Image (cartoon, rainbow, N blue to C red):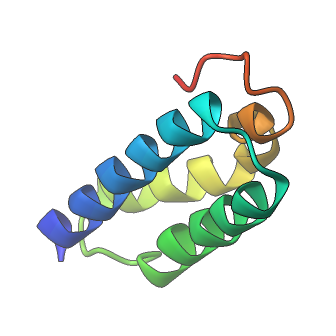
Amino acid sequence: MLSGFIDRLWHYYELLEYFKENPDCGFGVYLEWLFDFIFSSTAKTGYVMLDETIASTIKRKDRLLKVLIYPELPVT
């Protein structure tokens, strides 16, 4: 479960980087949906610290996904 989550997270990061270079409104909507899917489908990993980090990440979604509105912002 842990390695699957990490793989999904890195893949998502790569998609965000791609979006920065090729901004597209439709792709941005997909990336927002994918964020929700990744973080809701793995809400309980069995690792307390990771579960807390996921919960914290969900709370910061709007700030973290500003790059979908302003592609010139850094992903990190």
Q: Where is residue 58 in the image (x, y as percent from the top left)?
A: 65, 56
Residue at position x 86%, y 36% in the image: 69
Residue 63 horizontal/vertical position (percent): 78, 34
Answer left or right for 13 relative to 20. left
Q: On the picture, is 15 further left or further right than 23?
A: left
Residue sitting at x 40%, y 62%: 51
Quadrant assignment, res 30:
bottom right
Residue appearing at x 39%, y 43% in the figure:
14
Q: In this view, does 76 lie to the left or right of 19?
A: left
Q: How many numbered marks have been drawn onto this rendered protein structure?
A: 0
Q: In this view, does 1 lie above or below 59?
A: below
Q: Which image quarter holds the N terminus?
A: bottom left
Q: x, y (%) of residue 64?
A: 68, 37
- Against 12, residue 18 (above or below) is above
Extreme-left residue of the structure? 3
Q: Nearer the viewer, residue 58 or 13?
A: 13
Residue at the far bottom: name it: 41
Identify the residue shown where x is 74% and y is 55%.
28
Residue 41 location (% of width, % of height): 47, 83
Which sits in the foreground, 9 or 68?
Answer: 68
**Residue 17 falls left or right of residue 20:** left
